[in-house]
Every structure is written in structure tokens, then in C-alpha cells.
């Protein structure tokens, strides 16, 4: 019996070592890098989430919950006050049985909590992710005097609120909340250095978990090189953390930079798939005195060095509906990708139309066709 037990132990050790070796080899094998050609599929009429005549909706990030529902975290504010997102936006919560809708409003995720908080006046541009068994809601927050400076059809911006923008994160065990907010931003400006690219404000975070478990953030930053209150240039910076709640370490290299342009891009969404970090980005081309918007694609091997993808152009704000009708929107931005079973399947975008010069904004859910080569 002793001999038999010894043989059994030896076999167990051999088998377990073999499994460990196999796992190690699999982990060490790099994923094959492929190029993506991203196209839009036809959009269903039910894939539009609107606040009707009373609510302006902007953006929308979707995550699937343990309840099997798709949870959208989105920004909204009263339509009657005009384009006052920077001082009156709040992050709200909607659900659907499908990533393509229809979505139904449920509740407010991040509401106004008072100007004594860094994010007490407004919360905006959410992006939600599940990492390590918890849900992390990244967003822009600010505080200020709440002064309304525009009317419907004539958009202006409250610069106090704009320049108080910082990046925050809230944490929950479920996308239904409750969301735990923090007393400090997860990523603040660079203080005591007016030459820093983010010396004035930080906003619009995009986040994904890296292949080594760390957390990658690409964010919008504004410096103080140009006259205040607008400042500038507007750039994108990269930061990395060991934990979803930071601290994030800022990197030197800028993302999506185009030499000679002071505001070339905005609203990136980043994720990792098929051996590369991917990004869908709002491109801002300056043609004379006009700004022309489109959606383009970048990729990166390490999350730091971003290059235009082989198939760079994605869409000139054009959507095709199920009945075959094409529509070019005034704006099609805040792209947020839904990845399911390792594949990008849907794109959530903020869209709007102009009715009597007044912006009617909503979220649209677009099927993605991804060709790999």
C-alpha cells in the first residue's frame, strides 16, 4: 500500500506540473495581431434612446450585469435651459434586454451633491467597466456657480465649470448601484506647472484593463499655453494604474496627436482585442473656419504609442436605417463599444439633429461589422 500511495502522489505531482507548464506556455504565447476594418450595420428604429421634449441625452456606456440585462450609464440635463451640460448634467441609468435597445430610464446614478464637492455640480461623459468582480464608473465631474449662460438654439459655455473639470471614478457591486463616490478625483490636473499639457483641466476618460492586469486610461487634457479662459491646446494623455481606483501615473507621450493642430481629436473609446489596443475616436478637421467631424480608428501595441489604423476612416456621421434610408447626423460622437465574448458588437454614440436650430440629442446603438485581416 505504501508503494501504491507513493506512486499515486508522484502521478499527481507530474499531472499538476504538466498543467501548470501548459498554462504558462499558453500565457506566454502572444496573440496574433490583426487589422480591423470597422463598418456600421443597419440600425433599428428601437435603437434610439431619447429623453423626448424635456431631456437632452448625451453619450451612453453599456455593460452587461449579472441579472442578464444591459445597463446604460448616460448623461442628461433639462432641455429647456439650453446646451448647459457643463453645469447641469447628471449621470443616469437605463436598462434593456438587448445592447440594441429599447432602453428604459431607471434612476439617477450620480446626482448633484453640492459645490463643496469637486464633482458636486455636474457629472458627465460616463464610461462603465466590469473589472475584478466589481463595476467601475469613470466620469467627468466639476463644481461652480451653476449660472445658465445659453438658451435653446444659442449654445454658450460656463467657463468656470468647464475649467473645474476633473476625472472621477465610482464603484459598485452591481450596475444598479449604489455607487460609492470619492472625495478626490481619481485623476487631477498637474499643479504647479503651467507648461503641463493638463495644467487647466482633465476630462473624458477612456479606460480598459491591460493584458497584465493593470488599468490603462486615455483622457482629454487642456493646458494653459493659450489665453484663458479657453486655454489650450486640447490633447490626449495616457495614464496607467495598478488598480481601477488608482493612483494613475501619467505618461509623457501624447495620444492621437497631429502636429500643427491644437484640437485634433476628442472622445476616444479604448479596448484590447486580437493582440492590439484599439480606439475609436472623434476626429476634428479644421477646414477654413469650419470644423468637420468624423469617427476614425487608431491602434497600439502597448497602449502608449497610438497610430492611425490601416483602415483609419470609419464614418462621416452617416447611419443607414433598417429601411435603407441614409442619414447624416450633425454630430455622431462619444463612441462607446460593447464587447461581448471578446468581440466588438455594438457602438453607442451620442447623436443629434437640429430642429429650428435647437439641438435634439439622443443615444443611438449601432451594430458593428468588423472584418479582420
Image: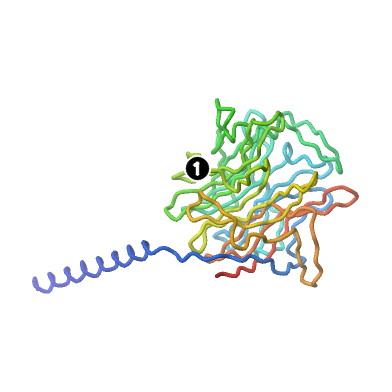
Please state the horizontal and vertical placement of residue 38, each as a whole percent of the image.
63, 65
Q: Of helix, strand and loop, which one carries label 1?
A: loop
Tally of marks: 1
Please state the horizontal and vertical placement of residue 110, each as a whole percent of the image.
64, 43
Residue at the right extreme of this rendering: 356
Name the residue nearer the viewer: 40 or 3.
Answer: 40
Q: Residues within 10 Å of mark 1 (few under 14, many from 20)?
A: some
Task: Name the residue: 69% across, 66% down.
Answer: 40
Name the residue nearer the viewer: 55 or 304.
Answer: 304
Task: Name the residue: 72% across, 41% down.
Answer: 89
Q: Pointer 1: what residue?
A: 245
**In the rendered image, the vertical position of residue 240 relative to residue 183, given as above or below:** below
Instruction: Report the colour scheme.
Output: rainbow
**In the rendered image, the vertical position of residue 271 relative to residue 88, given as above or below:** below
Q: Quadrant of residue 11?
A: bottom left
* Whether residue 27 can be seen here: yes
Residue at the top extreme of this rendering: 192
Please state the horizontal and vertical placement of residue 330, each as a whole percent of the image.
80, 53
Q: Quadrant of residue 45?
A: bottom right
| Quadrant containing the C terminus in the rendered view | bottom right
Name the residue nearer the viewer: 253 or 121.
Answer: 253
* Whether residue 178 can be seen here: no
Please state the horizontal and vertical placement of residue 240, each as a whole percent of the image.
48, 44
Side of 340 where 72 appears, left or right: right
**In the rendered image, the vertical position of residue 333 relative to residue 112, given as above or below:** below
Side of 343 where 53 appears, left or right: right
Side of 129 where 23 appears, left or right: left
| Quadrant containing the N terminus in the rendered view | bottom left
Residue at the left extreme of this rendering: 2
Task: Name the residue: 68% across, 52% down.
Answer: 282
Q: Quadrant of residue 61?
A: bottom right
Amino acid at each position: 500500500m505504501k508503494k501504491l500511495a507513493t506512486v499515486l502522489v508522484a502521478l499527481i505531482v507530474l499531472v499538476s506540473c504538466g498543467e501548470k507548464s501548459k498554462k504558462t506556455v499558453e500565457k506566454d504565447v502572444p496573440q496574433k495581431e490583426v487589422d480591423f476594418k470597422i463598418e456600421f450595420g443597419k440600425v433599428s428604429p428601437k435603437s434610439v434612446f431619447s429623453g423626448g421634449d424635456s431631456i437632452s441625452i448625451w453619450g451612453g456606456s453599456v455593460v452587461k450585469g449579472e441579472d442578464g440585462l444591459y445597463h446604460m450609464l448616460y448623461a442628461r440635463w433639462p432641455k429647456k435651459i439650453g446646451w448647459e451640460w457643463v453645469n447641469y448634467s447628471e449621470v443616469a441609468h437605463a436598462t434593456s434586454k438587448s445592447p440594441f435597445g429599447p432602453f428604459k430610464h431607471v434612476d439617477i446614478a450620480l446626482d448633484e451633491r453640492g459645490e463643496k464637492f469637486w464633482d458636486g455640480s455636474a457629472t458627465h461623459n460616463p464610461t462603465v467597466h466590469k473589472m475584478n468582480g466589481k463595476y467601475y464608473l469613470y466620469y467627468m465631474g466639476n463644481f461652480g456657480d451653476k449660472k445658465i449662460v445659453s438658451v435653446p438654439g444659442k449654445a454658450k459655455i460656463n467657463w468656470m465649470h468647464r475649467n473645474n473639470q476633473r476625472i472621477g471614478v465610482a464603484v459598485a457591486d452591481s450596475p444598479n448601484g449604489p455607487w460609492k463616490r470619492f472625495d478626490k478625483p481619481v485623476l487631477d490636473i498637474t499643479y504647479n506647472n503651467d507648461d503641463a499639457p493638463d495644467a487647466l483641466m482633465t476630462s473624458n476618460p477612456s479606460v480598459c484593463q491591460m493584458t497584465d492586469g493593470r488599468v490603462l486610461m486615455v483622457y482629454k487634457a487642456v493646458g494653459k499655453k493659450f489665453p484663458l479662459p479657453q486655454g489650450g491646446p486640447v490633447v490626449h494623455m495616457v495614464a496607467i494604474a495598478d488598480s481601477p481606483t488608482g493612483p494613475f501615473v501619467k505618461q509623457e507621450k501624447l495620444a492621437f496627436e497631429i502636429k500643427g493642430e491644437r484640437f485634433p481629436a476628442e472622445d476616444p473609446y479604448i479596448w484590447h482585442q486580437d493582440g492590439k489596443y484599439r480606439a475609436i475616436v472623434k476626429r476634428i478637421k479644421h477646414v477654413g473656419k469650419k470644423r468637420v467631424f468624423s469617427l476614425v480608428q487608431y491602434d497600439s501595441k502597448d497602449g502608449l504609442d497610438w497610430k492611425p489604423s490601416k483602415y483609419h476612416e470609419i464614418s462621416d456621421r452617416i447611419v443607414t436605417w433598417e429601411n435603407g434610408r441614409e442619414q447624416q447626423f450633425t454630430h455622431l460622437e462619444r463612441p462607446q463599444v460593447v464587447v461581448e465574448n471578446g468581440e466588438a458588437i455594438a457602438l453607442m454614440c451620442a447623436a443629434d439633429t437640429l430642429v429650428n436650430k435647437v439641438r435634439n440629442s439622443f443615444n443611438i446603438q449601432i451594430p458593428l461589422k468588423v472584418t479582420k485581416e
